[in-house]
Image: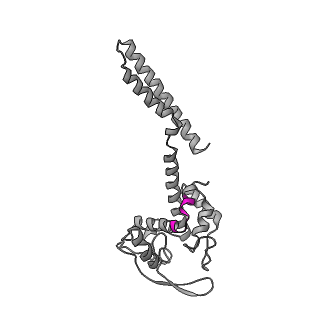
Amino acid sequence: MTSQEGAAYLIAGVAGVLLAAWQRDNIAAMVGGDTLQEDQTANGLQSLGALLDPTSWGFEDVAQTQAQANRRAMLETIAYAEGTQKEGGYYALFGWPAKGRSFFSTLDHPRRMFPYTDKAGNTIQTSAAGRYQITKTTFDDVAPRIGVRDFTPASQDAIALELIRQRGALPDVDAGRFADAISKIRRVWASLPGAGYNQPERDINTLALAYQRAGGNFA
């Protein structure tokens, strides 16, 4: 059963209950000697008709709720891939938690540099921090564009979503086109399959499972 079919069954059930209640109350009023005014009857039928009208069922709201769930699930998937999904991930510095690196102030990006050696043997410096391992360069570029002035969890979420949007993947995320979205953002996060940064990459099937567990929907 699709979400729209489920919503239709639910609304139909509610409509049935309301119709029975409306009929019961109106019959009781007539038996008791009360006379229903014409406008009261019309208003009651109008409200019931609106409920039964498929065009007023609000499937747009259902779709919007699914899109929001997909966005949250995608953020959870990225955090899983980056190794920062656990509690404390929003305060992670590169190498967390194995090396116990974390920060406390969220007034700004931590701006701390750490060396690492990639799979090709190259030593590289990185300032990756937070749940989505955002570098200071990325923060300085993206944050002003979306009005972010700090590095709080909410700001980190907003920056990550903006990075997804910049890659043209946000409509894919909203619609549940998981593989298409991952393909478009793989160069943003080195842990995603096909990123190509000589760093460990997660398997697409493992990420799809993490996405599903986080409440994501597939198209």
Q: Position of residue 35 (x, y in %)?
A: 36, 15
Residue at the image point whose x is 44% and y is 26% from the top: 45
Quadrant position of residue 107: bottom left
Which residue sits at x=45%, y=65%? 157
Q: Which region of the structure is painted magenta? A: 165-173
Taking the image as drawn, is residue 88 in sight?
A: no
Q: Is residue 214 above or below residue 41?
A: below
Left or right: where 177 falls relative to 50: right
**Placement of 179 over or under 9, stated as above or below:** below
Quarter in which the N terminus is drawn: top right
**Lateral position of residue 83 relative to residue 27, left or right:** right
Count of number-bearing discs: 0
Q: Quadrant of the C terminus?
A: bottom right
Q: Is residue 123 magenta?
A: no
The image shows residue 109 at horizontal and vertical percentages of: 40, 76
Q: Position of residue 190 (x, y in %)?
A: 57, 75
